[in-house]
Amino acid sequence: MTLSLYLDTDRWRAHQQSVLAEFPGLVPVAKGNGYGLGNQRLAEEATRLGTGILAVGTAYEAADAATWYGGELLVLTPYRIGEEVLPLPHARVIRTVASTDALRAVPGARVVVECMTSMRRHGIAAGDLAAVAEMVDSVSFEGLALHLPMDRPDGSDPVDEVAHWVDAAAAAGLPTRTVFVSHLGAAGMARLAERYPTTVFRARIGTRLWLGDGGALEVRGTVLDVTPVVKGDRYGYRQHPAPSDGHLVVVTGGTAHGIGLEAPKYVQGVSSRAKGIARAGLATVNKTRSPYNWDGKQLWFAEPPHMQVSLLFLSAEIRPPAIGDELGLQVRHTTTHFDRVVDR
């Protein structure tokens, strides 16, 4: 009995091909939990796509991916001086550097230089590009890397930001043959290609590539037990009383899978804030919507999820599922571990 991710494989791969056609020079990204599909599976899909390069999050992920993927591996997390030395296939691993000290510490390595964009996460400052240009002959310089923000409430143009860095790098004497870019749409990439015909702009894409067609992926949890209760019956670890007649449903999927665990969200707008306040208010009286649904209704948690299962409450007017039935659920794929991925 499992928490399953079902793939409409042909549709999923057709979506990948559409993204590849939209972004010439695409660099697929496989990192973390592999967007719920696993990094090994994504490495296999990247091989099928034929891009010749796969971006991974960390050097540890690169060490693993090297056994699954035969092409070049771009490590997105910047190299840090003193980090653990790993058995990487250096001839096909490209490291990101985000400081002049880090660049100086990796002579002979294949590198991309990350620039400090408006993300302000890490990167070389514009004023340091001249110093980078003086050191670039000591490494195998593969290009610039620009990680852009997803939202722009100030109305600024991401193409202008990329252009600023390309111009600044050229003025400092850095080659601008290749620029790796994250979070820029196809129209923006096309504008850049037209503006800089001698520069190759390569989009690094993960979420849109693997999860962009939600209809190709379906998540389901298996019903393990169904128990009738009457109002006032106590249940669960904390022995809460049943609020009414109904059923308790035990379904696969718990905290070990990432169910009930939620990353912080950035809330914008009055409506979103009101909904958040309403959810918080319900939680104070132990009422929390689960991600599971049955018969077109989103179900309530009967209590917080257990490690590998969740306990749900169905009121008497809802037809209960049978043991072995599967409940659909909505999850955040990047924080969910599935017991199995099923191609169909």
Image (tube, helix red, strand yellow):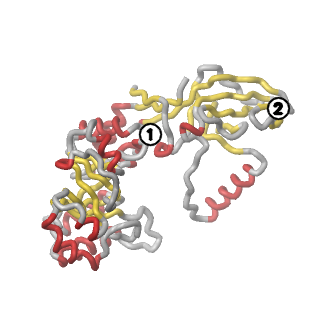
Label 2 environment density (alpha carbons within 10 Å; few <14, some 14–19, many ≥20): some
Image location (x, y in percent) of residue 158: 34, 68
Secondary structure beneath label 1: helix
* Residue placed under numbered mark 1 in the picture: 36
Give above or below for 51 relative to 4: below
x 26%, y 52%: residue:
74
Give above or below for 330 relative to 7: below
* Residue placed under numbered mark 2 in the picture: 234
x 28%, y 65%: residue:
102
Q: Are marks 2 and 1 in contact (CB under 8 Å)?
A: no
Q: Quadrant of the N terminus?
A: top right
Q: Quadrant of the C terminus?
A: top left
Q: Examine the rendering and report whether any part of residue 125 can be seen.
A: yes
Three-letter amino acid code of the residue under disc 1: Gly
x 44%, y 39%: residue:
36
Q: Examine the rendering and report whether any part of residue 19 can be seen.
A: no
Image location (x, y in percent) of residue 243: 82, 37
Q: Residue furthest right?
A: 232
Three-letter amino acid code of the residue under disc 2: Arg
Distance CA(mark 2)–CA(mark 1): 36 Å
